[in-house]
Amino acid sequence: MFDSLSDRLGGVFDRLRGRGALTEADVRTAMREVRVALLEADVALPVARKFVDDVTEKAIGQDVLRSVTPGQQVVKIVNDELIAMLGPDTAELEINVSPPAVIMLVGLQGSGKTTTTAKLAKRLSGTERKKVMMASLDVNRPAAQEQLAVLGQQAEVATLPIVQGQQPVDIARRALQSAKLQGHDVLLLDTAGRLHVDQALMDEMKAVADIAKPAEILLVVDSLTGQDAVNVATSFSEQVPLTGVILTRMDGDARGGAALSMRSVTGKPIKFAGMGEKLDALEAFHPKRVAGRILG
Ligand code: GDP
């Protein structure tokens, strides 16, 4: 991941560090190269532009250029800004509410929502020892509810029994009741995806959220779709009160643009990264580690 971006930035940094003194023009030239590297990694244009402007301002506005190691200082500023762009800390799930804490997963079809629901359920019931139940509200995609039931068996997590013909809001209501009765700590709701963002999808999510009062609404997006992932996240965050993002297929994402742009564009933290198809391939998203990987 981030190999090409990392190489490009490494080259820019070597040139900066290699010089004893730096002029303002040197910094501007280096930052132009950083900007191209970010855009090639598929970082959203406004994000790349702001990043470079912020770094440039800090690098030439302070006493950096007159310091003993100006190159080193500029590299440090880039590092700090990169961490700020990714989000300063790992964002935890906020599920300390009276049980069951409801986590809604939303997103487009094929983004990895159902798999991620099961991964999250497995993680919460395993390492975090919560009593977890999952329910699929996806009545559009044939066999979506069955798919979650199969994943539930693999993850050894309870799933709400399927009642054919029931609509999402009614399934949510039944799931909530059932989770309460059976003393579950967490209820994960896998909502229906669509091929594109559309109003019916948004209305359905809002209706479910009204009933379920989720502690978390997590948007699942495919990191491989780059800037599209960011556009999808922007559309969703305008309509539903998202609390975070899960980026899937980070295992295959060589460029990293979605990961880098997501927080700046949506204002929401990336909470987890999907790192493969297996149910234990879900990692907490660590901004500092990711920044470290990019900076090599
Ligand atoms: P949904 O339509 O959003 O519910 O998507 P699914 O959960 O059915 O996932 C679609 C495909 O993506 C499946 O083949 C999953 O195994 C795969 N998938 C999901 N998350 C990841 C991930 O993090 N990495 C990889 N490599 N594949 C994933």
Image (tube, grey):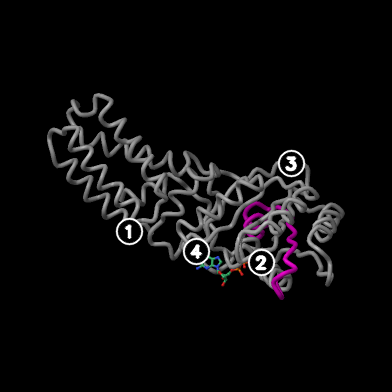
Mark 2, residues whose alpha carbon is within 10 Å: few (<14), some, or many (≥20)?
some
* Distance in Å between CA atoms under marks 4 and 2: 20 Å
Residue that carries the numbered disc 2 in the rendered image = 155
Disc 3 is placed on an element classified as loop
Q: Earlier in the sequence, mark 1 or mark 4?
A: 1
Q: Which residues are magenta?
A: 120-144
The residue located at (16%, 32%) in the rendering is 23
- Asked if residue 215 is among those painted magenta in the image, a careful observer would answer no
- The reply to whether the residue tagged 3 has its Cβ within 8 angstroms of ligand 1 is no
Disc 1 is placed on an element classified as helix
**Apparent side of residue 99 relative to residue 44 in the rendered image (left or right):** right
Q: Which mark is residue 97?
A: 3
Disc 4 is placed on an element classified as loop
Q: Which mark is residue 3?
A: 1
Can you tell which of label 1 and label 3 is closer to the viewer?
Answer: 1
Can you tell which of label 4 and label 2 is closer to the viewer?
Answer: 4
Q: Earlier in the sequence, mark 4 or mark 3?
A: 3
Mark 4, residues whose alpha carbon is within 10 Å: few (<14), some, or many (≥20)?
many
Type of amino acid at the residue the image marks with label 3: Val
Type of amino acid at the residue the image marks with label 2: Ala
* Distance in Å between CA atoms under marks 2 and 3: 24 Å
**Discs 2, 3 touching: Cβ within 8 Å:** no
* Distance in Å between CA atoms under marks 1 and 4: 16 Å
**Discs 1, 2 touching: Cβ within 8 Å:** no
Can you tell which of label 4 and label 3 is closer to the viewer?
Answer: 4
The residue located at (84%, 66%) in the rendering is 166
Disc 2 is placed on an element classified as helix
Type of amino acid at the residue the image marks with label 1: Asp
Q: Which mark is residue 249?
A: 4
Can you tell which of label 2 and label 3 is closer to the viewer?
Answer: 3
- Asked if residue 135 is among those painted magenta in the image, a careful observer would answer yes
- The reply to whether the residue tagged 4 has its Cβ within 8 angstroms of ligand 1 is yes
